[in-house]
Image: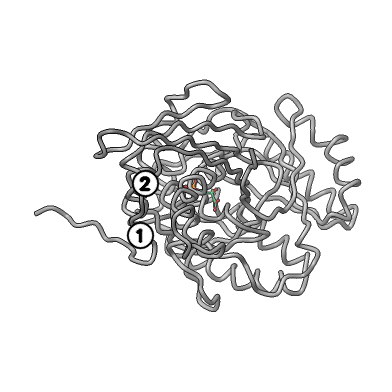
Amino acid sequence: MKKRKMVQEEFCCPTFNLPEKGVHSWQAPSNIALIKYWGKYGLQLPKNASLSFTLSACQTQTKVIYTKQKQADKFSFKVFLKGEHAPSFEPKVATFLERIEAYLPFLRNYHFDIYTQNTFPHSSGIASSASGLAALACCLLSIEKEHNPELTEEKFAKKASFLARLGSGSAARSITGPLMLWGEHQGTEKSSQLFAIPYEEPLDTIFRDFQDTILLVDRGKKEVSSTLGHNLMLNHPYAENRFQQAQHQLSQLKKVLKEGDLKNFTKIVEMEALALHAMMMTSDPYFILMKPNTLEIIHRIWAYREANDSAVCFTLDAGANVHLLYPKKEKKKILDFVKNQLVAFCEKGQYICDEVGLGASVIES
Ligand code: DP6
């Protein structure tokens, strides 16, 4: 018997007269998780809720040109990175389009030329899948929006997050800002496994313009893909505790965000980063993504914080790079600290200055 796909009715698309061709351009930011998503099941559903800062400078800019095809049974597409045909991106995009076709059925009538570029170096070790798939989801959903007046701004953001999630889990959190929460969480109304929601709980103003300086420790290609890493959580001996820990830390973090409690912010955020890497180091097979310079930087951050009564803290994603998080009022001092002490541990001395941002936006042509 053929397995029937489960479709979420809420996100289905009405039929409309198909345009011959058109173009949409969007940019979407990267995001950095404070509470980490690591472990998934089913079709891109998270084992625990996660919460992230939406970033501002690290963006993917995407233009989708769509042309109606004579034969309307399967979409076709080509991806171009900085104007050059980039076949290595195509398998991920193909899987994405197949997964979202049930929600944008007109896709099968079109050929898509997808032009994409990042505002950050591609080989920087910064995940471009979150920003890339969020930007692509927004471009494709814009085709529906042109013909569906029911798709208000709010519904657009929700469906864009829902679609982006099917491409990459963390992409669900790259649609709006300044913070986004994805995954069911007890005590957070409207939280969902299916899409991320803007974090609308009380938020101290200090977090609205928080800074993220990304130290590029290792710009190499990821040694272990996120999908592989997530899968290793399935039979992981500590997985259940880790998922519970994340849910609990999120509840704690909500209080911290409300009160502007920087001391406990540091504690939770650093604990999450190290818990994520501890899961990697204790899976079967085990792996270590931190490099010696990652550890050197962490120790220097701790020493600097102690000596200067600073609120700077760090987080990590699935790689060796270090994100330095701190309030805007410390910007000058922290950048001096980076230049004087940390840059020596960055590959080719590179780092990116980013800050909290508000999410994806249309690129006017
Ligand atoms: C460590 O979203 O890249 O950055 O859903 O398989 O595409 P897929 O995984 P991905 O995982 C991100 C993991 C993380 C933590 C986080 O961003 O929450």
- Quadrant in which the N terminus is drawn: bottom left
Colouring method of the image: one colour
**72 or 282: nearer the viewer:** 72
- The residue that appears at 65% across and 30% down in the rendered structure is 121
Q: How many marks?
A: 2
- Kind of residue indicated by mark 2: Leu
Q: Residue at x 25, y 34 (%)?
A: 71
Mark seen at residue 14: 1
Q: Residues within 10 Å of mark 2 (few under 14, many from 20)?
A: few
Secondary element under disc 2, as helix, strand or loop, is: loop
Q: Which mark is residue 337?
A: none
Across and down, in percent, residue 67 comes to 40, 34
Whether residue 210 is situated above or below residue 362 in the rendered picture: below
Residue designated by label 2: 18
Callout 1 amino acid: Pro
For label 1, the SS is: loop
Q: CA distance from mark 2 to mark 1?
A: 12 Å
